[in-house]
Amino acid sequence: MTQSRSWIPYALILPSVVFLGLLFVVPLVQTLWLAVSDNGTPSLANMTTMVTDLNFGRSVLNTFVLTLAVVPIQIIMALTMGSMVAKMNGGRETILWIWTIPLGISDLAAGMVWLSILQNTGYLNSILFGMGLIERQTAWLTYQTPVALFIGIAIAEIWRGTAIVMIIIVAGLNQVPKEFKEAAEIFGASPWTRFTRITLPLIRPALQSALILRTVLAFEVFAVVYALGGRNFPVLVGEAYNWQNQNQNYGVAAAYAVLIMVISLAATLVYLKAVKVDPERLP
Amino acid sequence: MANIVIENIKKSFGAFQALKGVSLTINDGEFVSLLGPSGCGKTTLLRIIAGLETSTSGDVLIGEKSVIGLPPKDRGLAMVFQNYAVFPHMTVYENVAFGLRMQKADDARVKKQVEKAAGLLHIEPYLDRYPNKLSGGQRQRVAVARALAVEPGVLLMDEPLSNLDALLRLEMRTELKTVLQEAGTTTIYVTHDQTEAMGLSDRIAVVHDGRIEQVGTPVEVYNHPATRFVGGFIGNPPMNFITMPVTNGQVAAGSQQFAVPAQGGEIVLGLRGETVERAQSGQGLDMQVRVAEPMGSHLLLTGSIFGQPARVILPATETVKNGATVGLTLDPKRLTWLSPESGVSYPAAA
């Protein structure tokens, strides 16, 4: 009986494999070919165009600086939030639900929300004017105010993307039996020592997942930046978008896409090495 | 080393009263078990002593000093948890050393103490391994070694053997007794397993429904249970309770007469199954045997006495058929008499 039905699992998995094959692997191969060819012959012309473009260096720098600024803050915030809810007895679910609201909003909508706060006629200026701190509308999001623009984008990204990190970390924290912390407490560990020597090592798998996911997403940042800064703050995906739509140069756009993929893969590898998870050392 | 005084501890979780006023004194170096069924409050009491839980009212003194309000680390105690709580990301050595490291002990002292504790628990070969590579019994040894390495004044153990299989439990029980005797630490041991409590303890405190029903040596608690609950909870088979009529302060059991602490009405006889002997035919207290089970070491009879369910044990050399009636001779010195209304036993006749 079981022998004759051994094909069933394969049959059930097949549609998803075909689906991914058609809609992921084929475009991936096409993109790779597009990036390293010119009129059907292998060529590094697209790569050269990308690297020599005025915005290339800035977009790489911006993307990396934004990622390096946003991801650690998000991880620290998520750890803090997760540890705080862990101490709650009632109302935990409600707080978690409120904290995860930004997850339900699209990137672009999130960008618009922050635009309505930070633009010249936005809520921030209204409040500052109302308090008498500024005398007239102040521009925060122009190329003349790069620091304010960067901070605005970083805050919007943190607001939008911390929830997903928090969910993963809360799930990780829930996996740590409370006896570990109690045992540490009995043997004299302070709250900070319990956190650094017991909790953090035990949530390594969750931490690793959260870091990989959040970093890859940070390298792909686009809509929030586009809504707030437009081309005043070039990022990698934004450049790919411009080459594709404004310049109608699919080859250079593909080159950017490949570069983003390589960076994401590299970041993943770095995390897999740096935040090593040894199954032998887990509960 | 320290003695422990527990004074009228009460604990409520919302409307639920987990502890309804518990007092207990534990002498320096003594091994006391808190024995009771699950949900009786014994673990809550242990956690209050440890400082992991706060009491609603009452006081706990360790070494003459009130520790209520002190964090666990300032109470001079160590604890062994039911699921071991051995840190999976540290080697056995670092686990055992954990308490000492937290006390900022220097490396030489850490090494000396870890080696001493590891020696006591026979875990020297595993010091470099991670706990995941160890069996449940070995992990439990690590947990005990971790607790003993800090040389605590008081050792608290919360069902430390209940996650082990039966054979290992027996082995660890014997070993724990040896190790703790050597260490001389005041120990409070929470368990629902009466054989564990009997075998290990200097004294047993039987906890039931948020109260301590009886405190005494294992033999006292076994032979003279203070209440019907204690008699029924301790012993295998449990104590038999047979309600019997009293005439003029006497109870008749077959050809035997016993003076009892009641004049008329009824009284409950608490009868340990193994304290009876088979009477000469036609004499003794009649038992209708429903099932006779030869267990090898003894013969277990299940049936009824005075129409009430009873289980007794006879020597393996006896033979009894299912459905037979046997006469039993009782040992007057080993009977417990209880009030049928309150279920409390009368003091044992001197």
Image (cartoon, coloured by chain):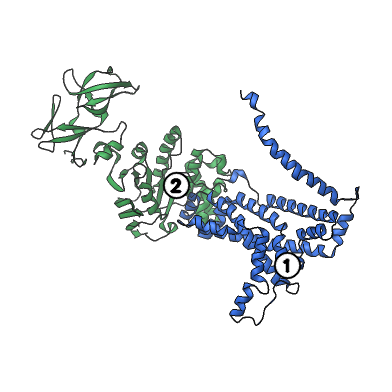
Chain colours: A blue, B green
Mark 2 or 1: the one toward you: 1
Give the residue at mark 1. Answer: A229
Q: Position of residue A274 (x, y in %)?
A: 68, 52
How many residues crowd mark 1 within 10 Å: few (<14), some (14–19), many (20+)? many
Rendered view: B10 above or below B201: below
Q: How many marks?
A: 2
Is residue A174 toward the left or the right of residue B59 in the image? right
Is residue A115 toward the left or the right of residue B216 in the image? right
**SS type, badge 1:** helix
Q: Position of residue B71 (x, y in %)?
A: 43, 59
Query: What is the three-letter code of the residue carrying label 1?
Result: Gly
Q: Which mark is residue B80?
A: 2
Give the CA separation, mark 2 to mark 1.
58 Å
**SS type, badge 2:** strand
> Circles 2 and 1: CB distance less than 8 Å?
no
Q: Residue at x 45, y 56 (%)?
A: A90
How many residues crowd mark 2 within 10 Å: few (<14), some (14–19), many (20+)? many
Query: What is the three-letter code of the residue carrying label 2?
Result: Val
Front in this rendered view, residue B112 or A138? A138
